[in-house]
Image (cartoon, rainbow, N blue to C red):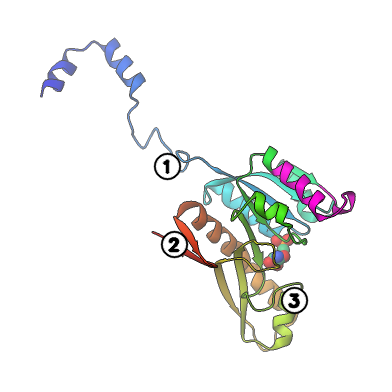
Amino acid sequence: MVAVFFWSRTTPERRRQFYALHPPRSRYRYNPVMTHKLTSLGILLSGRGSNMQAIVRACESGELPATVAIVVSNRIDAAGVAWTRERGIECRVLPHRDYEGRDAHDRAIVDELREAGVEWVCLAGYMRLLSPVFVTAFHNRILNIHPSLLPSFPGLDAQAQAHGHGVRWTGCTVHLVDTELDHGPIVEQTAVPVLSGDTVEDLEHRILLEEHPTYVRALKQLLQRRWTLQGRRLIWLD
Ligand code: GRF
């Protein structure tokens, strides 16, 4: 009541000063997506880059509360590099053969990522094992996608391995990265059926269609939810 009395006696100039200091919290002034700080992502790739594209698009649409600060490739001829550059996204090519060993190469990539302010690293078809140098630099902040339901069929040609084994179901897995191949804690998995007439290419295609939304979903949850690790189990806390 007292506040209403004083408010009615203020001059327009004082009201302007008050609103300048205390802007109204209306939905017209604040975009809920933009009120949160965007997480800076670094994406590493060696080839086609379709998972990288899915992440870039999800950032651009606001589906992911993140921005792609830099893309790094170890191969200049990677199709993903051309796409990134056409799009005007910061991109560095660091061929591993230019470095004396894995540690030196990884250290150079870590330097690039740090310089770009990267907080999370997404491996998207990056065909190199990460050294402890890299994994320690971004401890539990590195994700990978693998085209099988891990721990089945780690390593190269996972789709062909599943096809050849005759499994009825395979899929894709997004996991945190440690120094072992396709091994860290699992964040998200999507199952994909193997049909009896499938060629390996059919299966690759069906899995890839699921990889893109699975990667975005995993990343979104990690960025927006509270989580912890119990051993190698990732537990959601909310
Ligand atoms: C995907 O199948 C991914 O699961 C695996 O490498 C492939 C990369 O494809 N790690 P793309 O370059 O993202 O199109």
- Which residue is at 76% across, 47% downward? 107
Left or right: residue 116 versus residue 81 is left
Between marks 3 and 2 in the image, the one whose residue lies nearer the viewer: 2
Q: Give how far across and how far down residue 228 sits, in percent.
A: 48, 59
Q: Indicate the amino acid at tag 1.
A: Pro
Residue under pointer 1? 32
Q: Quadrant of ligand 1?
A: bottom right
Marker disc for residue 77: none
Q: Is residue 143 above or below residue 152?
A: above
- Range covered by the magenta-colored residues: 94-113
Residue at x 62% of width, y 86% of height: 168
Residue nearer the viewer, 24 or 44: 44
Residues under labels 3 and 1: Cα distance?
42 Å
Up-down: is 192 above or below 100? below
* Label 1 Cα neighbours within 10 Å, binned few <14 / some 14-19 / many ≥20: few
Q: Find residue 100 and report its horizontal and vertical position in percent.
A: 88, 51
The span from disc 2 to disc 1 (Cα, nearest Å) is 23 Å
* Residues tagged 3 and 1 counted as in contact (Cβ below 8 A): no
- Where residue 72 appears, as percent x and y from the top left, is 75, 49
- Is the CB of mark 1 within 8 Å of ligand 1? no
Image-quadrant location for residue 202: bottom right
Residue behind label 3 places its C-beta within 8 angstroms of ligand 1: no
Determine which quarter of the picture holds residue 10: top left
The C terminus sits in image quarter: bottom left
Q: Which mark is residue 236?
A: 2
Cα–Cα gap, marks 3 and 2: 35 Å
